[in-house]
Amino acid sequence: MPIYPIALQHGLILGAALFSLGLAGALIKRNAIAILMAIELMLNGVNVTFVSFAQHMPGAPGQPPELTGQVFAIFVITVAAAEAAVGLAIVLASYRLRHTVQIDASSSLRG
Amino acid sequence: MLPEPAPLVATLLGATPPMNAELLTALGFYALAGLALAGALGLIIASDVFHDALFLVLTLGSVAGIFVILGADFLAVVQVLIYVGAIMILILFGIMLTPQLGNLPNTGGPGQIAAGVIAAVAVLGTILAVITTATWPRASAAPIDLPAGTTSLLGTSLFNSFALPFEVASVLLLIAMIGALVIAREP
C-alpha cells in the first residue's frame, strides 16, 4: 500500500481502530459517563469510515458525487447528539437514586 | 516509500517549488490519525473521568482535522460545533453534577479488563481482515476530486435523496429533547 495518496484502506483502518478502542473502553470502564464517552468514540470511528468511503465513491457519469457517506455521517452525528442527551439524563436520574454513577450499583434487576 | 527528509524540509520552507502537496496531506493525515489514536488510548487508560473527557476532546479534534483532509469540510465544522462544543459541554456538566464520594475505581477488575481487551482485539482483527482482503469493486482507486466546498452538494443530497430521513431526524431530536427533560427533571 503506498503512503500517498491516502488509500481508502487507511481511512478504514483508522475508523476500525477508533471503533475497537471505543469498544474496549465501553467494556472496561465502570463509570457510566466514561462509558458514554467511549460510545461517542465508537460513533466517531464509524464516521471516519463513512467519510473515507464518501471520498472514494464517484457520482454518476457527468454528475457531481452524491456524498452519500458524508450525509450518513451527518445522521450519525444527529443520533449521537440525541443519545448523549438522553444517556446523560438517565445517568443523572440514576445518580439521584443511588448517589453514584458506578454501573455496579445499578444491579437491582440481578436475580 | 517516504522520500528523503531533506527535500521535505526544503519544501516546507518554500525553497523548492513546486510543493509536494500530496505528501504533506498524507503526513498530516498520519499525524492526526496518531493523535486521534493516542487520545482514544488515553481515554481508556486514564483513571479520572475528567481526564477521560480531555482525551476525548483531543480525539474529536483530530478527527475533525482528518475530515478536512478527507474532503469533508462541512462535517469538520459540524464535528467541532456539535461534538467538541455541545456534546463535550453536556458530558462536563454530567461529570460536574454527579460528584463522586471517595475515589472509586474507574475501570473494572482484571477479569473485566481482560474480557474487554479480548473482545476489542477480536472485533479489530475481524474488521482488519475484511478491509485488507476485500477488493471494493465500486470504490475508485484514487480519491475523487471533491469540490472545494461540499456544503451545497450535501444540501442538495439532504433535501432530495434524503428528504425523508432528514425530517425523521428532526422528529428524533424533538423526542430526545423531551425525553431528556422528562427523565432528568426532579420527581
Image (tube, helix red, strand yellow):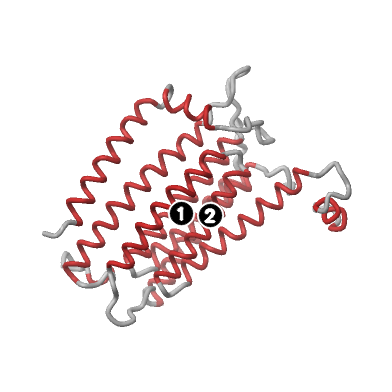
Q: Are the numbered discs 1 and 2 placed on the same chain, yes or no?
A: yes
Disc 1 and disc 2 in contact, CB within 8 angstroms: yes
Left or right, residue B68 beside residue B87: right
Q: Which chain carries label 1?
A: B
Q: Which of the two labelled residues, at mark 1 and mark 2, occupies the earlier sequence position? A: 2
Residue B61, label in figure: 2
Question: SS of the residue at dot 2?
Answer: helix
Q: Residue B128: x and y, percent?
A: 57, 51
Q: Residue A21: x and y, percent?
A: 49, 60
Q: Residue B109: x and y, percent?
A: 37, 77
Distance Cα–Cα, label 1 vs label 2: 7 Å
Q: Mark 2 lies on which chain?
A: B
Q: Residues within 10 Å of mark 1 (few under 14, many from 20)?
A: some
| Residue corresponding to mark 1 | B84
The disc labelled 2 sits on which kind of residue? Gly
Residue at image location 26% in from the left, 45% down from the top? B176
